[in-house]
């Protein structure tokens, strides 16, 4: 109504000024709100439970509003940061590589968990399935997580290829569950015979008695590799990037509040990281035909 009343007397210059003011206001809003998301490695409700305390911590440390919003799939997390729809993303190593390539090298990893320097995947099957090795998976129905998952697809596939097992040729059927918790469920329910997933999610399910290891258990664990990190876009102001990094590095397990955040993130502490740490994953992805 207000716009309709003024429109007859607004000049082109005044309209341009309003547009400029709107842009400035949007920019100002972006500078006072930090938008955070993660790859959906588990159900959205679990992601919110895990990362909301961290978002609250960052809000206090940065003195700005922090909004955590789950995304629907792994590619959405990549595109969100590449297109600057969010400011900070928790990536798997492979999704970081994808985002870096998509952005022309404009994605900057700032921290990773100490555990991410020696991450592993596990292969699981029902204990009465007869599957005791990677070779035993031939002719079976097998599930990976998301196609863009490092620990749930890329690295398990890489280790299979090293063992001269070609999933497309040697497995009866390949399924993609979309998330690690769904991967476990697919084996428990008998939808597939074996599956690969993130070792930390498996350990969490075991410790919380969400899976009975008498029925389903690990039959193969991969060698270590680099994995997850927190990444930002290179266009983020350097001072804000450093404040976020410093806040993550400052999480101290001797502080009860910090210890709870680290526990939810399945971490002992955060450490600095660099793009070079993920060159091996990029090579593995190219060798596996995923890039």
Image (tube, grey):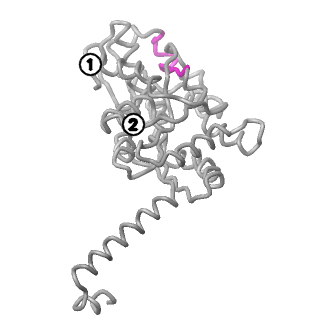
Residue drawn at x 50%, y 45% is 238
Q: Is residue 241 magenta?
A: no
Instruction: Name the chief secondary structure element in magenta.
Output: loop
Q: What's drawn in magenta, residue-wise? A: 118-132
Residue 225, position in %: x, y?
A: 49, 19
Displayed quadrant of residue 156: top left
Residue 285, position in %: x, y?
A: 34, 22
Q: Is residue 108 above or below residue 197?
A: below
Mark 1 → mark 2, Cα distance in angstroms: 18 Å
- Lateral position of residue 22 relative to residue 16, left or right: right
Local SS, label 2:
loop
Residue 75, position in %: x, y?
A: 34, 40
Q: Is residue 120 magenta?
A: yes
Q: As rendered, which of 138 and 146 lies closer to the eye?
A: 146
Kindly identify which residue carries mark 2.
178
Residue drawn at x 47%, y 39% is 231
Local SS, label 1:
helix
Kindly identify which residue carries mark 1.
168
Residue 170, position in %: x, y?
A: 29, 13
Displayed quadrant of residue 1: bottom left
- Lateral position of residue 126 relative to residue 149, left or right: right
**Label 1 Cα crowd, 10 Å radius (few <14 / some 14-19 / many 20+):** few
Residue drawn at x 45%, y 26% is 151
**Label 2 Cα crowd, 10 Å radius (few <14 / some 14-19 / many 20+):** many
Residue drawn at x 57%, y 31% is 272
């Amino acid at each position: 109504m207000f716009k309709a009343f003024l429109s007859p007397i607004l000049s082109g210059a005044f309209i341009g000024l309003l547009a400029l003011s709107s842009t400035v206001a949007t920019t100002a809003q972006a500078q006072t709100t930090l938008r955070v998301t993660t790859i959906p490695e588990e159900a959205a409700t679990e992601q919110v439970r895990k990362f909301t305390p961290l978002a609250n911590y960052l809000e206090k440390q940065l003195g700005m509003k922090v909004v955590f919003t789950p995304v629907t799939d792994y590619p959405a997390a990549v595109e969100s940061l590449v297109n600057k729809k969010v400011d900070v993303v928790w990536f798997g190593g492979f999704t970081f590589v994808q985002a870096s390539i998509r952005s022309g090298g404009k994605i900057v990893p700032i921290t990773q968990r100490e555990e991410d320097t020696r991450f592993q995947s596990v292969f699981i099957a029902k204990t009465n399935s007869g599957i005791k090795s990677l070779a035993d998976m031939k002719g079976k129905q097998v599930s990976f997580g998301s196609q863009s998952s490092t620990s749930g697809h890329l690295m398990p596939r890489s280790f299979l290829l090293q063992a001269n097992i070609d999933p497309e040729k040697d497995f009866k059927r390949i399924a993609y569950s979309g998330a690690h918790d769904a991967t476990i469920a697919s084996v428990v329910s008998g939808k597939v015979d074996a599956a690969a997933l993130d070792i930390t999610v498996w350990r969490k399910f075991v410790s919380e008695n969400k899976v009975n290891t008498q029925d389903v258990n690990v039959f193969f664990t991969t060698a270590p590799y680099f994995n997850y990190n927190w990444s930002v876009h290179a266009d983020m102001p350097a001072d804000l990037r450093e404040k976020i990094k410093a806040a993550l590095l400052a999480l101290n397990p001797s502080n009860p509040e910090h210890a709870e955040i680290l526990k939810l993130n399945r971490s002992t502490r955060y450490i600095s990281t660099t793009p070079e740490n993920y060159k091996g994953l990029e090579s593995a992805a190219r060798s596996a035909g995923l890039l």
